[in-house]
Image: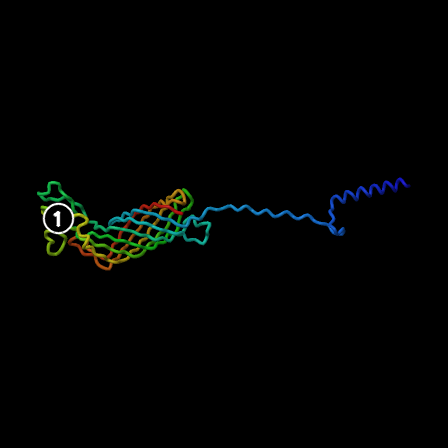
Amino acid sequence: MNKAIGAFITLLICSSSGYAQQVVFSSDSTKTVEKPAPAPVKPRLIKLPKPIRHELSFGLRLNTNGWSVYSDYGKAKTNNMKQVDMFHNVFYLQTEFTEKKDPKEEKVKSQTLTNKSSSTYIYGKVNNFYALKVGLGYRKLIAGKPDPGCVSIHWATTGGFSLGMLKPYYITLAGGTQSIKYTDINQSDFLDQRIIQGNAGFSKGLSEMQFIPGGHIKSALHFDFSANKKNVIGVEAGVNAEFYSTPVLLMANQKPVSSFYDLFVSFQFGRRW
């Protein structure tokens, strides 16, 4: 009996010591101290590239009545920041310099006998007409996927202010000692090919330049061929209209006009950032 009681006490002591190794008591023997929970691991932030919002491009425009050079500064507009790089909608400021020509303009060679090395001139041309245009435009995606390597089609509309610059066209007569411009008084000499030696040069008549205010509007399809989002490689095809406060005379024996209409194709290159 004593042996059985001793074995029971020994078993009880071993069990108590094993349990004590798992539980830590504080100074208050009635309370246990729990181990602190591990601190949460913060997710690693991935720095995304800055969205592309701006573009600057330059272009050459071939019109049915002349030529133009221009530049566009644009800014993408979208409520979805995930699509800002796709350039669905772009507002832009356009600056353009253009020269207007009459479809009947043609360079001819001088027929004067005194001019051994014949010069060329535009027969019947009365004035050179240039214009500086500043306008606001809006370009909207209408077809195609704006992903790299894909062609997208946009509708572009531009309108604004035009400043026309009218410069008299001077020609030199036989002997090269006299240059004249078109007037009602010397009309017969100005159109007499037998005594015309050639044009008097671009600088002749600059001091007589007249400035004519007006406005312009154009609408076109814009094709974006850029292989990546940071390049601008585009082609536009559309129509253009310009209106001026004073009628402009380009050729002799024609009526002056205050409005110009033309078709155009333009080529555009630039960068986005």
Q: Which residue lies furthest to the right in this view?
A: 1
Query: Which residue is pictured at 13% across the width and 41% down the height?
Result: 117
Q: In this view, does 54 lie to the left or right of 15?
A: left
- Secondary structure category for the residue under label 1: strand
Query: Which residue is pictured at 10% across the width and 54% down the height?
Result: 186
Q: Quadrant of residue 230?
A: top left
Disc 1 crowd rating (10 Å Cα; few below 14, some 14-19, many 20+) is many
**Where residue 26 appears, x then y in whole percent?**
73, 50
**Where residue 86 appears, x then y in whole percent?**
42, 48
**Where residue 20 appears, x then y in whole percent?**
76, 45
**Residue placed under numbered mark 1 in the picture:** 172
How is this picture coloured? rainbow
**Residue 149, above or below 219:** above
- Observer-nearest residue: 22 or 199? 22
- Observer-nearest residue: 105 or 40? 40
Residue type at mark 1: give it. Answer: Thr
Q: Is residue 95 left or right of residue 126?
A: right
What is the count of numbered marks?
1
